[in-house]
Amino acid sequence: MCLAVPMKLISVTDIGTATADAGGPQQEVNVSLIEDPRPGDYVIVHAGFAIEKLDESEAIARLALFGVGPKTQTPG
């Protein structure tokens, strides 16, 4: 079984790929199936392809289902 995972785009290239993060190791994903991908966008990734954009609140809710969340900075 494959899961579709919410991820945040960290950087986007001009060749249809992006670096994405879901709270673990960053991954390269194909963003050619979504319109106007930008760093900071949340997307659903399935089999290495971003297949849907999410708004931030929906992405955070879905990430909570996986037991992860966006990284936050703590005062140091």
Image: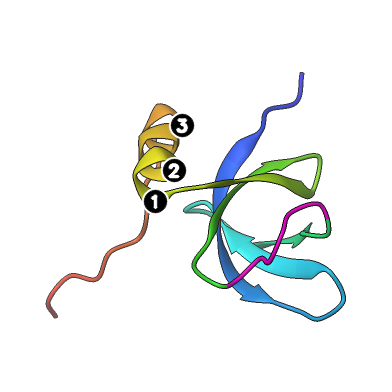
Q: Secondary structure at mark 3?
A: loop
State the image coordinates of residue 63 (x, y, percent, origin top left): 43, 38
Q: Is residue 71 left or right of residue 23?
A: left
Q: Which mark is residue 56?
A: 1
- Looking at the rendered image, the quarter that the N terminus falls into is top right
Residue at coordinates 72% horizontally, 68% vertically from top-left? 18
In the picture as drawn, the residue positioned furthest to the top comes out as 1
Q: Which quadrant of the figure has residue 6?
A: top right
> At x 68% / y 28%, what residue is drawn?
3
Residue 19 in the image: state x and y as whole percent. Answer: 67, 68
Amino acid type, callout 3: Phe
Q: Secondary structure at mark 2?
A: helix
Q: Amino acid at mark 1?
A: Glu
Which residue is labeled 3 in the image?
66
Q: Secondary structure at mark 1?
A: helix
Position of 37 compared to 66: left or right? right
CA–CA distance between discs 1 and 2? Answer: 5 Å
Mark number displayed over residue 59: 2
Q: Is residue 31 magenta?
A: no
Q: For the C terminus, give its image quadrant.
A: bottom left
Residue neighbourhood size for the residue with mark 2, other residues' Cα within 10 Å, grouped as few (<14), some (14–19), many (≥20): many
| In contact (CB < 8 Å): disc 2 and disc 3 | no
Give the color scheme: rainbow, by chain, secondary structure or one colour: rainbow
